[in-house]
Amino acid sequence: MTVSATAPLKHAGSLFSFALDTARASVRRPFQLREFLQQAWFVASVTIIPTALVAIPFGAVIALQVGGLIKQFGAQAFTGSAAVLAVVREASPIATALLIAGAGGSAICADLGSRKIREELDAMMVLGIDPIQRLVVPRVLATMLVAFFLNGFVSVVGVMGGYVFNVVLQDGTPGSYIASFTALAHLPDLWQGQAKALVFGFIAAVVASYKGVNAGGGPKGVGDAVNQSVVITFMLLFVANFSMTAIYFQLVPPKGA
Amino acid sequence: MGVEVRVEGLTKSFGNQLIWGDVSLTLPAGEICVMLGPSGTGKSVFLKTLIGLLKPDKGHIYIEGTDIATCSERELYEIRRLFGVLFQDGAMFGSMNLYDNVAFPLREHTKKSESEIRSIVMEKMEMVGLVGAEKKLPGEISGGMRKRAGLARALVLDPEILLVDEPDSGLDPVRTSFLNQVMIDLNEAFGATFLIVTHDVNTARTVPDNIGMLYHRHLAMFGPREMLLSSEEPVIRQFLNAQMIGPIGMSEEKDADELAAEAGQELPPLPPIPIQQLPSSGMLRATQRPPGEWCRENGITPPPGSFADTRAGAT
């Protein structure tokens, strides 16, 4: 293989066209309900516990940081509000995305990759079945669904973790922590967090599937594909996160501004 | 009845490395063909090109008037339903047991009831001798069983063309003969067109109606079995008789020095042409020609001892 300057562009292009193929195949009948439910259950089962374990310290760290900072400003009454804002807007979708990509995406990539090198995907195409419709679409939709709910879950656990640490460790006032929730945060914050989770789930699953079905060169190729899929997903996630945040601030002005 | 596959000027390369160029041949409807070639000559690539898993750089593959090399994705999925393919390791779906594997194409493509599916699946399982193993997972069975299961799955939609990738790799000679017998019987029963890709000389000598050979990035020869088995062409002769003397070397072709060293050596005489393996019924298949017919028609004297019935116990 000769390495040329346009190789990265070619990969980006084929990843993009793979995403389009997946989107197009997702509306084609028959929908693979069974595979979808199995995958949703599978992705949920590998991500829920690690996510919960990450969400608690995540919420706590934010509470500690924000709490300390706000004390210096002398605005303790807004501690709860600031923590909620940070968790719901940014921390929760990112934590969800990292876990979905790291636990769910890598499993999807390894699964599809090993099917690819065992010629299962070729066999499927020869049997007249499109692997994108049969295998990739259910996985992508399942990952998006799980990311959506997982984000809600992380938000709740994160806010609770923040509450506990603020009240117990920083001697915050329970009442004012809860009462200030809506001082800065408003409902669109939650919606944009959920929208982010959906987009991140889509990116993680599409990249993992793309790397999986294009794995080559035996068992080592599958390992490489998993590795690359996680790295690429993380890079894309942070870019997408930045863009979505920027757009959100343009579309929905912060409360009181 | 089987379907004819017409290949014209097919060329395939990966990057700037040519795999094979300008391959033209016709797989006659309902006949068994074998594609031979030393390791690494792109036999499997040829097979994957025939079903459209790989796009050729040039050339055409006509099946029932459709050109696979240029047709749309949708047409390709339609045409592929005519095919059954047995991959090298069977390519069974690892997450399903053998029964579900064999039933998979039926469940995806037909609206048959579970009881109809069951009777079809069990019929195919019986054909390949796997009754009793339906509940096993592909990881739990031997390579030979996986191949036979793959064959059952390839047969389940009653294909018109069956492509078989190295049925003999990793199998002992006895199992290979049994598998060959199964394929011959299937051809007799359904009349599907067969293409078997292999480098097993014994299979090539006894099973097919036609033999093709890929060598040195081109199709060296394609024609009736007796034509190749009586051929004096050095490459064909060396390969079909598994000899060391000839143009094929260890890595690819021999270089000039090696060839010069062999110049004076005389090739061993052609061995007798064996009798073609018959279906279990003992009758000639519809497309099978009586032994020696091609040689007589073309005025070629087959090597002495050809077409003798060498089966043990034959009188």
Image (cartoon, rainbow, N blue to C red):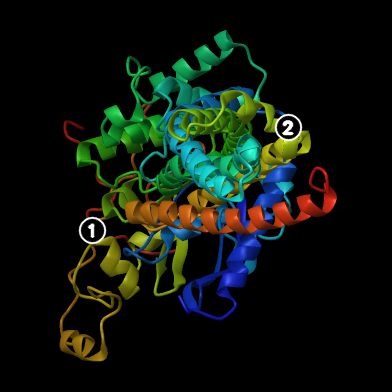
Q: Secondary structure at mark 2?
A: helix
Tell me the chain of label 2: A
Q: Is residue A149 left or right of residue B142?
A: right
- Give the CA distance from mark 1 to mark 2: 99 Å
Tell me the chain of label 1: B
**Residue ID for mark 2:** A182
Up the image or down, B265 lies above or below B193; here it is: below
Q: For residue B304, which numbered disc appears in the image?
A: 1
Which quadrant does the N terminus of chain A fall into? bottom left
Q: Is residue B208 left or right of residue B303?
A: right
Q: Which corner quadrant of the image does residue B257 belong to?
A: bottom left
For badge 2, the amino acid type reads: Thr
The spot of residue A111 in percent (x, y) is 44, 40
For badge 1, the amino acid type reads: Pro
The spot of residue B272 in percent (x, y) is 24, 56
Q: Nearer the viewer, mark 1 or mark 2?
A: 2
Q: Is residue B9 left or right of residue A186?
A: left
Question: Which residue does the image show at 57% across and 31% down from the upper left?
Answer: A159
Q: Which corner quadrant of the image does residue B185 belong to?
A: top left
Question: Which residue does the image show at 26% across and 69% down from the upper left?
Answer: B238
Furthest residue to the top? B115
Badge 2 local density, few (<14 within 10 Å), some, or many (20+)?
some
Is residue B181 visible from the viewing direction of this image? no
The spot of residue B19 in percent (x, y) is 46, 71
Q: Is residue B120 left or right of residue B89?
A: right
